[in-house]
Amino acid sequence: AQKVTQAQTEISVVEKEDVTLDCVYETRDTTYYLFWYKQPPSGELVFLIRRNSFDEQNEISGRYSWNFQKSTSSFNFTITASQVVDSAVYFCALSGLGGTSYGKLTFGQGTILTVHP
Amino acid sequence: GAVVSQHPSWVICKSGTSVKIECRSLDFQATTMFWYRQFPKQSLMLMATSNEGSKATYEQGVEKDKFLINHASLTLSTLTVTSAHPEDSSFYICSARLAGVNEQFFGPGTRLTVL
């Protein structure tokens, strides 16, 4: 069985602060994908990143960065210099690559991020 | 590219009626589509996996007779909520996967309210 845990239910920061969203996962698959999605109030999921379990390199995209630590089964997401437009619910998700778990996304509970001006 | 649409974007219906939600991949062929349900302030839960030309695979606890899924073509899957009740009120989101690619493209969602 797969499981994704986002322990932070809600985070509130002031604009320009850095914020890290935690994600811990469990899977028996040896290969898998990890994802982060943003869900603004409109409800539509916005894809942010996909990371293959083979690739433990950290990634940076503008103000966003991701830290994948396979040893601790964590895939944390950091927003640098947060902005009000970053306010949304953020989901971490896991997809297996083998057998019955292929392609199925298991989502974490989500973290509500509120950035105050 | 990789755009997925859903129709309607929102629907209000009376208890006991059936509601059909369409999910279309607009610029690619999707051999597999997924249906998720999201209750307010909760996460997305996978309801079923729909493969073109075959029966859908439902997740544990999802009633297949209540949530009818049809994937008649490579660009269209439909979810019909039969005999809807207020507890079925939720945000329904579909996603479509390109053949051979482990990446899902999500639709904008359909908000169902059952009175």
Image (cartoon, coloured by chain):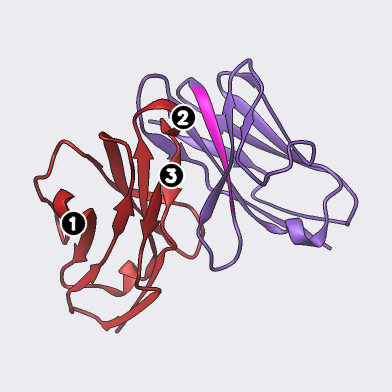
Chain colours: A red, B purple
- Residue in view at x 76 percent, y 61 percent: B87
Relative side of B64 to B98, left or right: right
Residue denoted by label 2 = A100
Please, what secondary structure does the residue beneath circle 3 have?
Answer: loop
Residue A37, compared with residue A56, is above or below; it is below
- CA distance for labels 2 and 1: 25 Å
Identity of the amino acid at label 2? Answer: Thr
Identity of the amino acid at label 1? Answer: Thr
Q: Chain of mark 3?
A: A
Relative side of A112 to B75, left or right: left
Q: Earlier in the sequence, mark 2 or mark 1?
A: 1
Residue denoted by label 1 = A72
Q: Position of residue B20 (x, y in %)?
A: 75, 39
Q: Position of residue A70 (x, y in %)?
A: 17, 49
- Residue in view at x 22 percent, y 61 percent: A77
Looking at this view, is A8 or B40 the one in front?
A: A8
Residue denoted by label 3 = A1
